[in-house]
Image (tube, grey):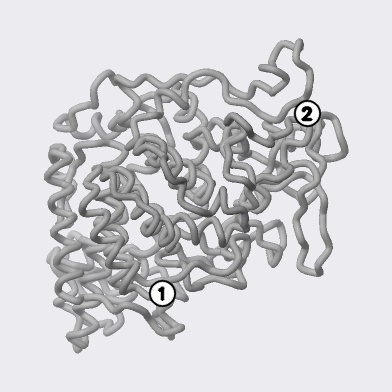
Amino acid sequence: MKTTIKNLILSAVLVVGGASCVDLDTAPYDRETDLTYWEEDPEAAVKALNTCYTYLGNMDEQLYCEAMTDNAYTKQPNDFTQNIGNGSYSTADSYVKQVWDGRYTGIRMCNQLLENIDRVPDLDPELKKRYIGEAKVLRAYSYYELYTKFGDIPYTTKVLSIKESMSIARTAKATVIANILADLDEVINGNYLPTSYDADNKGRITRWAAMAIKAKIYLFEGNWTQVKNITSTIMTEGGFKLFGSYAGLFEIANEYNSEVILDAQYRPTSREHQMMYVFLPPTLGGYSQLSPLQELVDSYIMLDGKTIKETGTSFDESHPYANRDPRLKATVMYTGNSYTLADGTEVVINCEKGEGKDGYGVGSDCSATGYYIKKYWDNTYRATLYSGLNPILIRYADILLMNAEALAELGELDKTAWDATIKPIRARAGFTLASAVEFPEGASKDKLIEIVRNERRSELALEGHRHKDIIRWRIADKVLNGWCHGLKTNENEVVGTDNGYVRVENRAFNANKHYLWPIPQAERDLNANLVQNPNW
């Protein structure tokens, strides 16, 4: 039996049982328990570690978190992110609780492995070291996901008893950050992890993934010098390169390509997601619960490098998708764009109001914005739109963008740095005009920061990065207040439109409250030491 990450064997939850007439430390006779599992199964460590990986990330979380931003909208309010996006969520929000529970379950699994790995018989010392490294990085990533949303959080490196879990207090965010950075430094500097794996172990945490996560933490904290230094090391020593095709990055045939640093593992038939059912148009069997917003579409620049609102722009509102950043076509489905089926057939979509099967307003399964998602379309899908396509969590373009942002913030983004970061990203996207690919000489520091931020949005759209970006940039109160919009219907005088653009949702973001999520009330009901965040 293989126990590689590729197979993602899910270990049973370890339980300790007993009978009233038997000593509590005596193992039951009818099932495997924590008393015997670690000592009797030589593959116990890798099985437990593979279980830890299932909490790293998933396609649902990656895409739905976009609806908490000005990139997307979900028309499904229950158990998803609509209420977070529009600011109406409460301390009882089910999605907030789901994130809290999921991340702490992953942390508990990592702690369980780290506490028990010494009990596994005949475990090769180098493998043991690697497993410890993987578990510590996975744990650090979950803590990163928690503190960036909740601020101060309960922090532990051991498996808590029920009693302990009902009394643990929140640890200061600064301490959490210091602790997870110390873990990452231990793993990176101690060479716990390889720089790559064989085919059976693709998807495991590498040394470069650990460094990239470290860079992400410093990025969120605005430590530009550290971001610059770490990303520069990955750029010069990591051996990564941009994949030749932007659209091809997200095809199942090209998984584990030269750009992927970390992705969540799925596999056809054995571990699949059904997110295409959530975002595809009715023509392809979807019901478009999640849709891109006009605000995302508007953010894509023209082929000459100008924005659609910039003086001298060539943007023509009557032909809104002409001469635009090619990544728009690869990311968002609009009228005239198409999906390619496995047999090569092009399915052209008509999103216009009242048109065909997929047009805006035609039916309840149609997009609420008049746009559909194209990125992560998997034309090898199994029946009822099940897919084994891996969502990419960190890729090399992100490293280049982090490096460019750090340099821009430090006032060090010059032609040389631009040519190593933004230029190759735009060239790969399909830009050719010098006005778009060459360094904008004379641009101010603020202008360069603006350019890099928008480049980040366009390059990484719908990949789960936008929410953290608008939070760390402190612009969420600007972009998540007021109406968000769908496509233009040319009905300028109709109630429910702004200059002809469909009003989708009236959002509210309270800067004194919403930059942190609430501690779930259900957790506070169990543990009085969990103090609530301000204004919740």
| Amino acid type of the residue that numbered disc 1 sits on in the rendered structure | Ile
Q: Residue at x 17, y 56 (%)?
A: 181
State which tag comes first along the sequence, 2 or 1.
1
Mark 2 surroundings: few (<14), some (14-19) or many (≥20) residues within 10 A: some
Q: CA distance from mark 2 to mark 1?
A: 44 Å
The residue singled out by tag 2 in the image is: 361
From this view, report whether residue 490 is shown above or below residue 380.
above
In the image, 146 versus 338, the foreground residue is 338
In the image, 528 versus 448, the foreground residue is 448
Q: Residue at x 32, y 71 (%)?
A: 236
Mark 1 surroundings: few (<14), some (14-19) or many (≥20) residues within 10 A: many
From this view, report whether residue 175 is shown above or below residue 427.
above
Element type at mark 1:
loop
| Amino acid type of the residue that numbered disc 2 sits on in the rendered structure | Gly
Discs 2/1, front: 2
Residue 125 appearing in the image: yes
Quadrant occupied by the C terminus: top left
Q: Residue furthest right?
A: 356
Instruction: Locate residue 285 relative to residue 241 in the image: left or right.
Output: right
The residue singled out by tag 1 in the image is: 5
Instruction: Locate residue 21 relative to residue 14 in the image: left or right.
Output: left
